[in-house]
Image: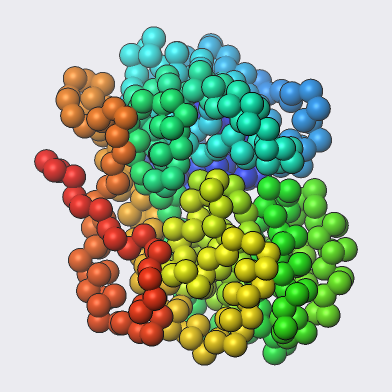
Amino acid sequence: MKIVIVVDSWNKGNGCIVASHRLVKELQLKGHEVSLVSTRGEEAMKFEGPFYELPGFYLPGTKESMKNMGFMWARGKKKTLRKAYEGADLVQVQLPFFVARNAVRVAKKMNIPVMGACHIQSQNITGAMSTGNKLLNWSINIWFNLELFKKVDAIHCPSEFAADLIKSKGSNAHFRVISNGIPKQYKPLTTLERPELFEDKFVLMNVGRHALEKNQGIMIDAVLKSKYKDKIKLLICGKGELTEKLRKQGKQLPVEPMVRFISDEEKYLYLNTADMYLHSSGVELESLSVLEAIGCGLPSLIENSPNSATSMFALDDRLIFHTEEELTEKIDFWYENRALLPELKKQTLIAAENYRIENSVVSMEELYNDVIQTHKGAKGLLPKGEKIIPYVRNTESTQKHLQDNKTEVSSHKSRFRIAFPRKRSGS
């Protein structure tokens, strides 16, 4: 299959681009020919496949923050799009920004199947601006619909939350719920030794861009109020405009947190040897960092936010927090009950199997097929205004594994998405 991916930038500065990289890699490994249409950048110039360059730009007042993320908006140059689409079986538009409308329009004029993806919500923008302005959020959602979400018949959504969200904002497309997936390298590695920098501390880890909407400061404040603050080490891994502010804030703690960017090798090591993962971001359509954590079996303590899907990964209510005070209480609880964590790790790994990227890429191939067949006249494959959660092939074995490995942890009310969907009728 020849697939064209249209996305504003190819630099790995945000979750959408990282997820897109992973999807493309898996598709290429399965023999699909993938072309990239994007702005010029370091990563785009290294793309292993046909690359078609679009002109880029910054909106007034956004240049510095966009450069920090390695992001640039693309202009939908029709000549470039037409050239990129020649001989394509399918076009997938990843973001509902300025390039999207022309990307869809050109595909339709060339009679090529085209679909969209949902990797952003308005709060990603307003949260970064430190404003909860309802009118601004409403305006951004109208813009997203005009550019993409009301222009295509099918949209890939990484979570049910994402599908429900864009439907509530006016899209009547077909929504296919497919996780971005846990890459193969994020798995338990039992041979790794605990790093010396952990000492004898209770290690809480977070990975993500140091930015306002990621809300990492709440973790420092929560640990500061903990009864066991002198026994806890925080790892706030990443970089961004708030890195120095977080370092300064962290100096209040008796055990100074590690606040810096880490390599992939360090990330694999820490995810396999830390005690728990903390996720404080209130704006997420899924969360690649939590997927990576659960892929390694790291129990995750997650903020429950109305603008986030990530609480679906919490095994039970003891792994959910709503406020800074509640986070402190949960940290203290898990420090006092850390003997439960090895069993919790087993449960996390069992449930994580459903989110492995191998499952996701097969489901994406099925979605591509449905889009192409619908374009050719097939009926019923993409019911409008409805969401489909693809059948998970390892459901029976995974549920048997759960039944055979009941523990004290599983006696609590489960929140994790292990109530697997049924196979779609007719498939």
> How many callouts does the rendering have?
0
Vertical relation: 157 (above or below) 343: above
Image point (19%, 50%), residue name? 423
Q: Quadrant of residue 31?
A: top left
Q: Which of 10 and 28 is in front in this view?
A: 10
Residue 316 placement, left or right of 245: left
Vertical relation: 249 (above or below) 1: below
Image point (80%, 52%), residue name? 242
Q: In which quarter of the image is residue 44?
A: top right
The answer to whether residue 88 of the structure is visible from this angle is no
Q: Where is residue 171 in the image (x, y as percent from the top left)?
A: 41, 26
Q: Quadrant of residue 206?
A: bottom right
Q: Which of 280 and 103 is in front in this view?
A: 280
Q: Which residue lies furthest to the left in this view?
A: 426
Image point (76%, 50%), residue name? 240
Q: Position of residue 371 (x, y in %)?
A: 29, 29
Vertical relation: 172 (above or below) 269: above
Q: Where is residue 284 in the image (x, y as percent from the top left)?
A: 55, 48
Q: Position of residue 390 (x, y in %)?
A: 27, 47
The chosen color scheme is rainbow
- Quarter of the image where the C terminus is located: top left
The answer to whether residue 77 of the structure is visible from this angle is yes
Residue 269 placement, left or right of 147: right
- Quarter of the image where the N terminus is located: top left
